[in-house]
Image (spheres, rainbow, N blue to C red):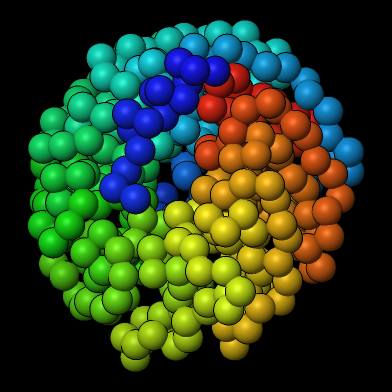
Amino acid sequence: MRRATEARRRREPYSSWTLCLCVSVACLSGQTQRAAPASEWRQFRGAPQLTGVSAGVLPATLKVLWTYDAGEVVDSSAAIVDGVVYVGGGDGDLLALDLASGSLRWKYAAGNLIGESSPAVAGGTVYIGDLGGVLHAVSVRDGRPRWTFQTGSEIKSSPAVAGDVVLVGSYDGHLYALDARTGALRWKVLTQGMVHATPAVQDGLTFVAGCDAIFRAIRVADGGEVYQIEAGAYTAASPVLDGDRAYFGTFNNEVLALDLRRRTVVWRYADPDSRFPYYSSAALDGGRVIVGGRDKLVHAVDAASGKAAWTFATRARVDSSPVVAGGRVYVGSSDGRLYVLDAASGKRLWEFDTGAGITASPAIAAGRLVIGTQDGTLYVFG
């Protein structure tokens, strides 16, 4: 446990391509499914709009099906595609594990530690960033490298695939767009701070909330900046998109709703009784924004009004990003517990004590939930 804690401290932040044109067009349009299909979870938050919602349903009472010792802290959140779990281990290995049994399919050594960057899977390739600033493209079949791309600083952003382009942020201040097949640079956009968040994609645009307190809309095709919205605070959380709205939390202890058409802040939610930052990325389901806070609470906020719907208290801060499936909220806490809450009321339905803090976020697919912990254990529930 001490090894995991020391590794976490070292990494604490400041406080393939598609096979046909029709698939490519779908990835760049607003027609992309907003909930991840029940059978797969291809990227961080499940879908290009980063909604944190799965179309799948899990058993009412979960049980541990298997565990895997990833050897270090697991900050990376898993991807699940075609019966395989992909996850980054803190010791620098990208792992491919059989979803049914937990057996190792292959292991790819990144050469650097892997932090919070979570894998994205598309076109027979899995993409992930590392703390040496390298983005890796690896064959899903055998774990062999396809290409790497070196940025100027560590990558904690999770890659997102939009058609034949891979998008990822770096602590060197850039948002990068790379050719998914070759790794060649298409374009890069320089911001005024580190790019920690994962880019969201909708209607041919990619959106990123930044550590420079600016929310940007950028064309995927050429990297042209379409507009900016001042968020007013350092932002590490990734934005969730819903048509003309975007939602995310900030280090100014607020959750924001943005109107993307009018390019204004619609509302700011702040709990009057607890002023702590939001590091967790929000889920959006049933007209509610559901997000973890460093105040040890899970918050549900009405998406239309910005008023509190409910809160649920854990025993430590909640940096894990919640996932909603079948009317239930699944979220980890640094208190070491995986919680299952009723999405309508916030009532606790179930919990499981892993014995180690959880900062990674759940991935849900094929009737399974996958999540890693701070002692390097990967859990699969079903």
Q: Position of residue 251 (x, y in %)?
A: 38, 63
Vertical arrangement, residue 298 with respect to residue 230, above or below: above
Q: Position of residue 31 (x, y in %)?
A: 49, 65
Instruction: Please name the residue shown 44% across and 88% down the image.
Output: 266
Can residue 22 be seen? no
Q: Nearer the viewer, residue 164 or 85?
A: 85
Instruction: Please name the residue shown 41% across and 50% down the image.
Output: 23
Q: Position of residue 13 (x, y in %)?
A: 32, 43
Q: Nearer the viewer, residue 95 or 279?
A: 279
Locate the C terminus by quadrant: top right
Vertical arrangement, residue 26 with respect to residue 67, above or below: below
Q: Nearer the viewer, residue 96 or 231?
A: 231
Vertical arrangement, residue 293 with respect to residue 270, above or below: above
Determine which quarter of the picture holds residue 141: top left
Locate the N terminus by quadrant: top right
Instruction: Please name the residue shown 20% across and 45% down the image.
Output: 171
Determine which quarter of the picture holds residue 16: top left
- Left or right of 121? Residue 155 is left
Vertical arrangement, residue 149 with respect to residue 164, above or below: above
Q: Position of residue 268 (x, y in %)?
A: 47, 82
How many labels were placed on the picture? 0
- Left or right of 272? Residue 148 is left
Can residue 288 be seen? yes
- Left or right of 262? Residue 75 is right
